[in-house]
Amino acid sequence: MAIRQIRTIGDEILRKECKPVKEMTPRLKELVEDMFETMYETGGVGLAAPQVGILKQIVVIDVEDGNQYVLVNPEITETEGEQTGPEGCLSVPGKSGTVTRPEKVTVKAFNEDMEPIELTGEGFLARAICHECDHLHGCLYVDKVEGELEDVGEAEEEE
Ligand code: ZN
């Protein structure tokens, strides 16, 4: 396992569309492990492959609910309600902004063994799923922010 370098805003790769994964290879499994390690090292709760420079539809999430979610080729199939709150991103260091997201989302995806899965998340998990899936389509939360971006302290958790 290895810590990978996180690409930050201004890097063109963050604005590109990611390709679906056709098959899980040892290399991609290693990427998933590295993504978790990189996310934990940097204090994030989610990380998308383009953030480490790989244009594949892979997301990892750990919002400290006891699960390590791996979402390959995720597709949000249902949304419900609305929540407005602060959001941050490892690719936009030191900043936070207010974003409105669905309160509840259901996502269809594959796990790291390419088995189909379905995940429904509410609250913070729903926010993380939306935020990370956006990364796979070249979208950053700053595109959706309401008002100004604010400076945050180093200790704040970022997605
Ligand atoms: Zn992000």
Image: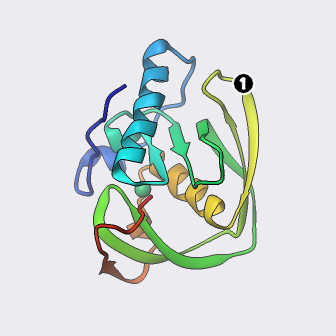
Badge 1 crowding class, 10 Å Cα cut-off, few under 14, some 14 to 19, many 20 or more, is few
The residue lying toward the viewer, choosing from 13 and 68, is: 68
Side of 80 where 58 appears, left or right: left
Please tell me which residue is depicted at 54% across the width and 26% down the height of the picture: 21
Q: Which amino acid does label 1 sit on?
A: Glu
Quadrant of the image occupied by residue 111: top right
Q: As drawn, which residue projects farthest toward the left?
A: 10
Give the quadrant of residue 83: bottom right
Quick one: quadrant of the N terminus?
A: top left
Which one is nearer the viewer's eye here, 71 or 154?
154
Q: With 128 as the anchor, is 113 left or right in this view?
A: right
Residue 50: x percent and y percent?
38, 41
| Residue lying at the far top of the rendered structure | 26
Residue wearing tag 1: 115
List x then y, in percent, for residue 99: 51, 75
Q: What element carries label 1?
A: loop
Q: In this view, does 86 lie above or below 16?
A: below
Q: Is residue 64 above or below residue 123?
A: above
Left or right of 5, for residue 110? right
Q: Residue at x 57, y 20 (%)?
A: 22
| Above/below status of 99 relative to 9 | below
Q: Which of 85 and 14 is in front in this view?
A: 85
